[in-house]
Structures are given as C-alpha cells and as structure tokens.
Image (cartoon, rainbow, N blue to C red):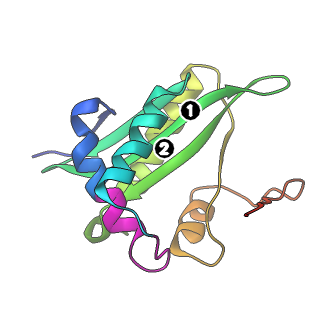
Amino acid sequence: MTEHIEAFREDYLDECAHLLVSTFNAEPWNKNWTLDTAKKELMWTMGVPGFIGMVSIADGVKAFATGYREPDDTRDVFYLKTFCVRPEAQGTGVGSKLIASLKEHLGRDGVNTIYLITNKGTPAETFYKKNGYTVNAEDIVMTHEW
C-alpha cells in the first residue's frame, strides 16, 4: 500500500492508542500508558474545540499527530499534543512528511505557529530541531504536583 496522509478519524482510535502505548512506554519516556488511558486521552483531545489530527497510512497507521487550534492574543496557534511514529518507521522520513503536511494544512487555515512540549535530550527533541523547531527563550514549562 502506498503511504498517504489523511485526517484522524475515530476509526483510527484503537490503532493509534496501541501506537501511543508502545511508543511512550518504551525508552526514553518510560511512561505507564494502558490502552484504556491512551484511548481516553485521544478521545478527550478529539473533543477539544479546534481539534486537528492527521495519520500517515501504509499497511496501517505508521504515524499520527493530534492537537488543537487555539486563540492567542493576536492569532490562532496550534498545540501539538501527541505525535507518534512506529518505532520501525522512525528515521525513514514518515514523521517529517507528517509534520510538513500538518504545517501545510494549518497554514491554509491561517495558523503559522505550532507549539509543543517534549523531553530534553530525547530523539524527539532532535527530530523537532531537524524540522525547524527551536526552544523558545521566553517561555518555560512549570508543573506543580501534590
């Protein structure tokens, strides 16, 4: 099957949940996703106003991106919430093609900023830098756990 990119639909939910679990429970993230929590997260994101998702398909889902468009002070921006590429497809260009397609889609709708959160020192950081993303010197990520 020829690789193609299309909109994320609910019928991709199970396959994308499996991909999310296998990606983020492995090195370097070592999270504790289950299929139930992954599906819950993806369904929640799909319900956010401004949801946009895309999948790369070739013999099933090779990669997917989900997030949402949101208003900022002077424009709309896109928060890239989840981005996954099958481990065996990493380094093949599928992720770069998907992120470029997402950027093109958003640009047609007047969005020219994507922001995301990822872990320092991971292959994801390298991937995003290779695709033109930079660390924003003005912002920091802060958390509070209790």
The residue at the point 34 percent across, 62 percent down is: 21
Residue that extends furthest to the left in the rendered view of this protein:
1
Please state the horizontal and vertical placement of residue 44, each as a whole percent of the image: 46, 36
Say above or below: 62 vs 6.
below
Q: What residue does disc 2 label?
A: 100
Secondary structure category for the residue under label 2: helix
The residue at the point 67 percent across, 27 percent down is: 70
Q: Please name whichever residue, 16 or 128, is drawn nearer the observer in this view of the structure.
A: 16
Please state which amino acid type lies under the numbered disc 1: Tyr
Q: In which quarter of the view is residue 72 placed?
A: top right
Q: What residue does disc 1 label?
A: 68
Residue that extends furthest to the front in the rendered view of this protein:
146
The residue at the point 46 percent across, 70 percent down is: 31
The residue at the point 31 percent across, 70 percent down is: 87
Number of labels in the image equals 2
Say above or below: 10 vs 80.
above
Over which residues does the magenta segment extend?
Answer: 19-31
Please state the horizontal and vertical placement of residue 125, each as a whole percent of the image: 60, 68
Secondary structure category for the residue under label 1: strand
Q: In which quarter of the view is residue 138 placed?
A: bottom right
Viewer can see residue 23 = yes
Position of 17 with respect to 70 (left or right) is left
Position of 127 with respect to 64 (left or right) is right
Please state the horizontal and vertical placement of residue 90, each as a whole percent of the image: 35, 67
Q: Residues within 10 Å of mark 1 (few under 14, many from 20)?
A: some
Say above or below: 27 vs 45.
below
C-alpha distance separating marks 1 and 2: 16 Å
